[in-house]
Amino acid sequence: MSHTSLVTGGAQGIGAAVARRLARRGDEVWLADLEDKRAEGEDLAGDLGGGFIVIDVSEPSSVDQAIKGCEGLDVLVNCAGVTIPGEPVDEVPTEHWNAQIAVNLTGTWLCLRAAAGSMRARGWGRIVNLASGLATRGMPGSAAYAASKAGVTGLTRAAAADLAPHGITVNGVSPGYVDTPMTRDFPDALRAARLAEIGMGRFADPDEIAAVVEFLSSDDAAYLTGEIVDVTGGYRIC
Amino acid sequence: MRGLEGMSVLVTGAGRGIGMAVAERLVEEGALVAAADLREPVECAGAKARLSGDVTSEEDVDRIFEEAWDELGGVDALVLCAGIHWVGPTHEMRPEDFDRVLAVSARGTFLCCRAALPRMVERQSGHILTFGSTAAVAGAPGLTAYAAAKGAVLQITRSIAAEYAHIGIRANCLCPGATNTPLLRELMADRADPQGFRDAHPIGRFAEPAEIAGAAAWLLSDDASYMVGAAVMCDGGFTTV
């Protein structure tokens, strides 16, 4: 069965990989991202036969307007996120703290709130939030990001409890290290240290994270809700 | 699901309940399945081989694995569903009851992995999917031995994942919640408040075996290629609340 799906942060990275996956299985896919990602977003949407919507997930009016534009929304994937790393907790500027909480946590909630109504009405829905291993593990210089993602984890579980009776599942995907321009630029020593901590000895391809999102937004995952699925290749399992 | 077509899979506990549903789903996906169970005859639609034996017995497990290898032309994956329970107050449980429950789940999982790993190491690839339970991570009144056994299965899985991931062997643990199987029906018959237990699941119902089978098939597939050492709860939100 074909679904109507919305991927926030869909113009690049994991969001774009998710959009490709969902389009490949036959979904009508809406990519939502910031105005300054319009060019990449429209190009990808064109390739996928889908649409691009401008969204600022930290702004309630922007979220409501964007989601209103996706009639019959079945699947919401919250990939929009921002990180400002390298700031020790006692040196984080207030505006950096607020920006990460606003996009990563409040933004996820705003999108979920806007999408849940029509899913409830139809008695079927899939919501997948991008979480992070930093929700449960400390890493220097990541306080605001970690707090926002711990919030996403709590939000995911509470939302799952609220929405399960209405046929809507809410799950999180917690990726480990992913092969991106940023991780490719790691200094050799840092890269070797991270790889040594990963059982599989390699970083994930973004498509491997997207594959888990695809499963969680499928009929086969009907009984899976409130779960944060670790997709880490065995990162620090011992 | 990608990668299941032609995969050779040995499924234990395949004679009924979740094990049977998993085996049948894998057959549907094009896998070559050897269905093993303690009970004979092993009835599993579409299985290429039907094998019987006791997973607590080293000799039986080694024989089952070799038979599966011969019948399927190799074993790419293990799916370890064999399990039993003992229900009742912990202070009334006999040591032999405790030992038996642990033997089937924990020892059985270890023996099956031990039988399969040498060939997987040789081939530098393989999949091991074990079956935990919500009881592996949450208290389970009246099911102390079962919870201990499933906790052990989860830790066996994580340890094997950590030990063998670097050579291409993926081990994961699927943890179903209450699932509509003969085992659950026996448990519910003994329960004073079955509706209360059902209501403790946010989704408002127990799982069907086919729903667990869908998650199991996915974990074996290439769509879960970066998942190693994971404990995936498939429980309708039971451990969420």
Image (tube, coloured by chain):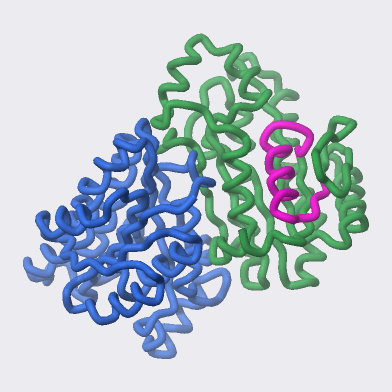
Chain colours: A blue, B green
B21 left or right, relative to A106: right
**Does the magenta-highlighted stretch encompass residue A210?**
no
Q: Position of residue A10 (x, y in %)?
A: 31, 69
Q: Is residue B9 left or right of residue A22?
A: right
| On-image quarter of the N terminus of chain B | bottom right
Residue at screen point 35% across, 75% down: A46
Report x, y in % for residue A74: 36, 49
User: Quadrant of residue B18 in the image?
Assistant: top right
From the viewer's side, name the closer residue of B5 and A234: B5
Residue drawn at (48%, 83%), measured in percent from left and top? A192
Q: How many marks?
A: 0
Q: Quadrant of the C terminus of chain B?
A: top left
Residue farthest toward the left in the current orientation of the protein:
A94
Q: Is residue B81 left or right of residue B239?
A: right
Magenta residue span:
B13-34
Q: Quadrant of residue B30?
A: bottom right
Q: Position of residue A43 (x, y in %)?
A: 32, 80
Q: Is residue A200 visible?
A: yes
